[in-house]
Amino acid sequence: MSKKRDYHLPSLKDAGRRSREEVSVETFSLSDEAKKLGEGKTYYIRTHGCQANQRDSETMAGILEAMSYRAAQKPEEADVILINTCAIRQNAEERVYGEIGALKRLKKEKKDLIIGVGGCMSQEEESVKTLVEKYPQVDIIFGTHNITSLPALLESVVKEKKRKVEVFSRQGEIYEEVPVTRFASHKAWVNVMYGCDKFCTYCIVPYTRGKERSRRKEDILLEVQDLLKEGYQEVCLLGQNVNAYGKDLKDPDGFGGLLEEVAKTGIPRIRFMTSHPWDFDDRMIEAMKKYDNLMPYIHLPLQSGDDEILRKMNRRYTSESYRELFDKLRRELPHYAFTTDIIVGFPNESEEAFQRTLDMVDHCRYDNAFTFIFSPRIGTPAARMEDSVPMSVKEDRLQILNEKIAFYAKEANKKFEGRDVDVLVDGLSKRNSSVYSGYTPENKLVNFKGKDIHIGDIVRVHIDEAMSFSLNGTAIEKDPLF
Ligand code: SF4
């Protein structure tokens, strides 16, 4: 591998710029040569991070299969290994470096093995430098905006036997007709928009994923209709900031209008991820009240219950406006379940500020929450903020918070005891292969006993017992006369 820098480093500064230019919509295509490149060869993809990454990996798999590569069961059997990375927290990055380090041995044994690193880490200048300087086993580094360049990158690595780095620090475009290999046959991710313009001060996503750009409604609906025809039971509409959908298209119906159109397709279950309180409007509530196939579950990130911290986070809402929205949702949608995200130990978070977060949790009594200790990301404003709170205090706060979350989670789950619920089956439980697992409309994980049950079935289950973060039950046998 050449040591001369023959690539451009990504720039967070460029990636953080926003213009009013219209987003271009491109159509993906493959040359005849690219379609044959993978004949007789296999690929393996390891995915880290959020649902957007899971969906991107499905696109990578789709592109590779369109190039005639076939899926391998293990990295040891693959000719191409792609690692789709996450940059949201430092420990996620460290895990990735450990994994790439371990691939060195495989590369030694198999000289033609191609290792590619994509995802959010590839959008960061420091990570790209580290990958190039310390991990010579990596052949391709490609950014979140460069997935559609995979065929060209693979072709040149095969021909030139030289490392390729392609990371655009731009605001991004939209590609349609990109091949996709879905990893599940009953639930599907559907991207409705990409990027984020909110610039929360702790978050790297607006830099790694580009500006907010919505897909055309007709393209989304076509995708959902196709999934319905293929027998999918559930779609999850994805966006970093999903309820900002349509703002860039000047669509007055926004995300609420999209929810309604997707509901009309008749697909049995619809979810969406992740909504921002600031963009949550009445049009969405209206749609949710109207359609039963919009699942009764909302993830509404809080992050902090303290106004000063919220201001420093640039969250665009106050504790009061969050509380008002939350109360309205509880009032209008009383059968809904609510979860949230909370960060503890944001720079200089005082004891009082933390207490206000606990107070908000007491008020909202969430069904569950994803809780994290603040992790500074290089290049974001929060990483430059002074912080006098010791890590041991942050860890204690996380524990206190988690105990409270577990208490309310159990309280919410208790209400399900003795009830019969519909569970969309994911398969056998990962922890106990003698029971099945799946989710209720409220997104409650259910482990249950039963027989002759298949992935993708919607099964009526009697809930016997509530745990803090799951429910245990028994499938209700169907009356043979019906
Ligand atoms: S809205 Fe979400 S994705 Fe966007 S900057 Fe804030 S935390 Fe990051």
Image (cartoon, rainbow, N blue to C red):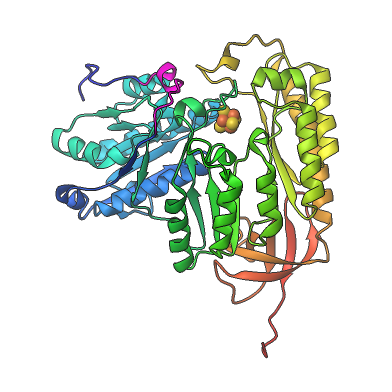
Question: 393 left or right of 166?
Answer: right
Q: Is residue 456 visible?
A: yes
At x 51% / y 29%, what residue is drawn? 205
At x 47% / y 50%, what residue is drawn? 217
Tally the numbered discs: 0
Q: Vertically, is 79 above or below 378?
A: below
Residue 117 percent location from the top left of the image: 36, 34
Question: 400 left or right of 83?
Answer: right
Q: Is residue 69 visible?
A: no
* Ligand 1 image-quadrant field: top right
Residue 8 percent location from the top left of the image: 29, 20
At x 81% / y 39%, what residue is drawn? 364
State the residue in front, 305 or 278: 278
Q: Vertically, is 200 above or below 214?
A: above
Q: Quadrant of the N terminus?
A: top left
- Magenta segment: 10-22
At x 80% / y 47%, what residue is drawn? 330
State the residue in front, 342 or 469: 342
